[in-house]
């Protein structure tokens, strides 16, 4: 599970990712909330945990996300932890997701196509003259690539604590989708 806490003007996103038997990661669901208060976010988190029973998760704990990360760890699951986005870890998290996309090891449920596509298109990989890589998320009417951030946090949680393989709730054939985007089924 990955949880990107939305601030003023941003969406809150909670992503559920399953690891399939072939080593592919399947984004089963992304719950989106806009301008949701803490209580609503916590209620949705509990409801989703009841449905998916995540074995690991990260909550964006920078700023207003810190109390939600603490709540998630204490009241929902001890396997959910805060994750502080910082220059020292942001590139690793993004590079992990990018590698899965280019290796065709990341698949999304088809109902997520429009939201995921717009979020992923807002992310730019920037390499400076010294060869250092950084990622920049642009802002649009929907926020600041919140859905992508939640997915990236879920993938990083899976990277840190591999799960037993699972089957998605709904699964169909693969089809390619262009650019920096993964496959949708």
Image (cartoon, rainbow, N blue to C red):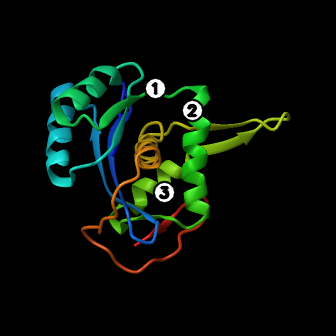
Q: Nearer the viewer, mark 1 or mark 3?
A: 1
The residue at which mark 3 appears reads as: 117
The residue shown at (30%, 27%) is 69
Q: Quadrant of the C terminus?
A: bottom left
Residue toward you, 78 or 125:
78
> Residue 40, image x and y in percent?
16, 33
Measure the C-alpha gap from mark 2 to mark 3.
Answer: 24 Å
Measure the C-alpha gap from mark 1 to mark 3.
Answer: 25 Å
Q: Secondary structure at mark 1?
A: loop
- Do the numbered discs 2 and 3 sit on residues whose CB atoms are within 8 Å? no
The residue at which mark 2 appears reads as: 89
Q: Earlier in the sequence, mark 1 or mark 3?
A: 1
The residue at which mark 1 appears reads as: 84
The residue shown at (79%, 35%) is 128
> Residue 146, image x and y in percent?
42, 40
Residue toward you, 100 or 135:
100
- Do the numbered discs 2 and 1 sit on residues whose CB atoms are within 8 Å? yes
Measure the C-alpha gap from mark 2 to mark 1.
Answer: 8 Å
The residue shown at (52%, 51%) is 120
Left or right of residue 93: residue 52:
left
Query: Is the residue marked by circle 2 packed among few (<14), some (14-19), or many (20+) residues within 10 Å?
Result: few
Q: Earlier in the sequence, mark 2 or mark 3?
A: 2
> Residue 147, image x and y in percent?
41, 46
Q: Secondary structure at mark 3?
A: helix
The residue shown at (37%, 68%) is 110
Q: Earlier in the sequence, mark 2 or mark 1?
A: 1
> Residue 127, image x and y in percent?
76, 40
Q: Quick check: 92 above or below 19?
A: above
Q: Quadrant of residue 178?
A: bottom right
């Amino acid at each position: 599970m990955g949880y990107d806490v939305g601030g003023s003007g941003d969406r809150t996103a909670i992503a559920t990712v399953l690891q399939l038997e072939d080593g592919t990661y399947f984004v089963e669901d992304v719950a989106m909330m806009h301008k949701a208060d803490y209580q609503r976010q916590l209620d949705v988190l509990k409801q989703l945990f009841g449905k998916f029973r995540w074995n690991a998760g990260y909550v964006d704990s920078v700023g207003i996300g810190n109390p939600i990360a603490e709540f998630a760890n204490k009241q929902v699951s001890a396997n959910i932890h805060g994750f502080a986005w910082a220059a020292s870890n942001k590139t690793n998290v993004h590079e992990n997701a990018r590698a899965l996309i280019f290796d065709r090891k990341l698949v999304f449920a088809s109902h997520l196509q429009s939201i995921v596509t717009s979020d992923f298109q807002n992310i730019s990989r920037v390499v400076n003259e010294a060869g250092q890589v950084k990622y920049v998320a642009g802002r649009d009417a929907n926020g600041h690539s919140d859905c992508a951030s939640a997915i990236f946090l879920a993938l990083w949680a899976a990277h840190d604590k591999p799960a037993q393989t699972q089957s998605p709730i709904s699964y169909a054939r693969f089809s390619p989708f262009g650019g920096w985007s993964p496959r949708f089924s």
